[in-house]
Image: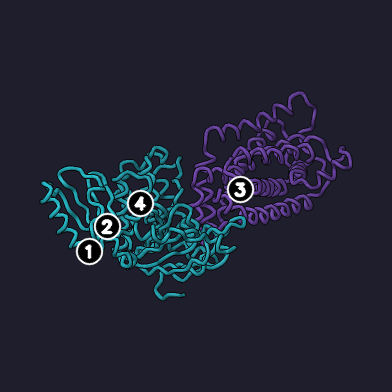
Chain colours: A purple, B cyan
Amino acid sequence: MRSGLRPVWVIAKKDIRIYYLKGPVLIFGVLFPVCLFLAFAIGRAVPPANLVPGLIAITLFFTTSSVSPAIAPWETQARTLERLLCAPLSLPAILGGDVLASFLFGSVLSLVPVGLGTWVFHASVKHPAALAVGFLLSAACFAILGILLSSPPTDKPSEIMMLSNLVRLPLIFFSGVFLPLEQMPAWGQWVASISPLTYCTESLRYGFGGPVRYGPGLSLAALLAFAILFWAASVRLHRRSMSRRLWA
Amino acid sequence: MTHAGSAIEALHLARSYDGLIAVEGVSFAVAEGEIFGFLGPNGAGKTTTQRMLTGVLPPTSGTARIFGHDIQREAVAAKSTMGVVPEVANPYADLSGWQNLMLAGEMYGMARAARHERAESLLREFGLWERRHQKAKGYSKGMKQRLLLAMALIHQPPVLFLDEPTSGLDVESARLIREQLRALAAQGATVFLTTHNIEEANQLCDRVAIICRGRLAAVDRPEALKAPFAHSQSVLVAFDRTLEASALEGWPGVSRVEKEGDKLRLFTATPGALVRRVAEYAGGNGLEIVSLNTLGPSLEDVFLALVQDRPAASEVAR
C-alpha cells in the first residue's frame, strides 16, 4: 500500500492534525455557513430549492479551499518542507494528501448547510444520487483548486491568501449562486460557464429539484474536467516551484 | 565512475540557479560503512550538493545514485534507504516529540508496533523520553536537533545524510550527536556529513571532500590530505611568563611564530630540533616550560590552502 494510497493518507492525517483541528479553523468552518444562511435567507422569499443549493455550494467552495492554499507556504516558513521532501513520498502523494485533508474538512463542514437546508428550510432532496455525486465531486474539485492556488513559491501565507481571495470571491458573483444563470447578461453567462462553482451549484440544484440550465451529466462532467485540469496544473506548477521555495 | 559496493555515488552533478552555476562537475563515491565529510566554506555548494543527493533538488545535469538507485528516476526506492537531517529544518512545532517520530515512521511505511518500539528506544537514547509528550515548539535548539536526528533514524536507514548537524548546538548536544554518528558507523551505516566544522570532520570522517566555489578541490583521507603540508608542523609552547611572538621570531628553521592566548606556536619542518632549541632558550632565560606539544599540519591548514584563490564554477563556465 506504500506506493498507493498510504502516503496520501499519512500526509492527510498530518494536515488534519496540524492545520485543520484548530479551534479558530473549526469555529470559522461552522460559523461561516450559519452566517451565510442568516445573511441570505432571512427576509427573502427565495424558494428553498433555489437558495439551499447555492449556500451549500458557497460553503463547499470556501471550506475546501480556505486552508489548503496556505499549507505549502506554512511548511516553507516553518522549515518542515525539506524533511517532507526527503521522505520516500512522491510529489503527487504529498499534494494528494493535502487535497484529501481539504476534501474531508470541507465535506464534513458543508454537511451543516445541508442539515440546515433540509431540516430548517425543508428543502427536499429529489435526486439523492446526483446530489451526493455533485457534492463529493465539487468538494474534490475545490480542494484541488486550493492546492493549485498554493503553488507560487512564497513562504508568506498572507500573500497566498490574498491571491486566493482574488480568485475565489469574484467567482461567487458569476456562478449562478445568487442570480440564476438565465437572468445574467450574455457576458455573465459566458463567465459562469468557465467557473467550476457554476457546475457545483447546478448539480446541487438538480439534486434538490430546482431549475437548472445544464443537465446533471454535463455539470458532473464539467466538475470532473475541472478537477483533472486543476490537478495536472498543480503537479506541474508545484514541481517547478519547489526548488525556488527551498532557495528562498 | 561507478563503484561496486558504493552507498552513494555522485556523477558529474551540476546545478544552476537563474543562470548562476552553484555546483558543477561534482563526482565522488562513498563506500558502505564510511563516514564521509563534505567540507567547504559558506556558499561553496555543500547544501546544494546534499539536496541533489537526497532528491530534494533535481540536478541541472549529472546523476546521483543511492545503493544503485537513481535518485531522480527511482526516487522512492532511493529515499527509503536514507535518513536525512537537513541544514535548515524543524520538527513540526505543534506536534509532540512522540508524534513527530510517529509521523516520520509512517512516512517510511513502518508498522505501528515497530514504530512504537523504535521511537521509545531512540527517545531514551537521545535523552528526550521524559519530554516526549511536550510539543516540539517548547524544545531547545539542541533538543530539536536531537529529535530531527531521531526522526531520520526511525527506519534504521543504511545511509544517513546530515547537513551541519552540530552547528550552533550546546556542547552536550553536539557531543551526543557525534557519539551517535560514531556508533552508527560502527554498526555499518554510511554517514554523509556536510559541515564547515573542520575539526569535527577531522575527528569523525574516514574521508573528506572539500568543495569550493561549486567545484571539488580534493577527496581523500584527512591524513593523506595533510601529508603534502608537512612543512606546516609546529611546536606549541607555554612558559611560566607570557612572551610576545617577536621574542622567538627569526630562529633558524622557524617559518613563522603565532601567539595563541598565553602560548606561542612556532611553525617548522623539523620539530625535534626545535624542541631542543626551545628547552635551551628557556634554560638560558630563566623560564619554566609549563607545556610543550608538537603538532602536525591540521586539516584547517589543508582546507585554507585548497580554498584560497580557486575560481568559482560560474567564473570557469564563462
Which numbered tag is attached to residue A153? Answer: 3
- Which residue was labeled with disc 4? B119
Question: Spatial distance from mark 4 to mark 1, Cα to Cα?
Answer: 54 Å
Question: Spatial distance from mark 3 to mark 4, Cα to Cα?
Answer: 34 Å
Question: Are dots 1 and 3 on a single chain?
Answer: no
Q: Looking at the picture, which amino acid does disc 2 mark?
A: Phe
Q: Looking at the picture, which amino acid does disc 4 mark?
A: Ala
Q: Are marks 1 and 3 in contact (CB under 8 Å)?
A: no
Residue shown at the point (19%, 51%) measured from the top left: B237
Residue shown at the point (47%, 68%) measured from the top left: B27
Question: Are dots 1 and 2 on a single chain?
Answer: yes
What x and y, as percent, mark residue A130? 72, 48
- Which residue was labeled with disc 2? B267
Label 3 sits on a secondary structure element that is loop
Query: Badge 1: few (under 14), some or many (20 or more) residues near its Cα, within 10 Å?
Result: some
Camera-side mark, 3 or 4: 3
Pinpoint the chain carrying mark 2: B
Residue A125 or B274: which is nearer the viewer?
B274
Q: Looking at the picture, which amino acid does disc 3 mark?
A: Pro
Q: Are marks 4 and 2 in contact (CB under 8 Å)?
A: no
Pinpoint the chain carrying mark 1: B
Query: Badge 3: few (under 14), some or many (20 or more) residues near its Cα, within 10 Å?
Result: many
Camera-side mark, 1 or 3: 1
Question: Spatial distance from mark 1 to mark 2, Cα to Cα?
Answer: 9 Å
Residue shown at the point (77%, 37%) measured from the top left: A177
Question: Spatial distance from mark 4 to mark 2, Cα to Cα?
Answer: 50 Å
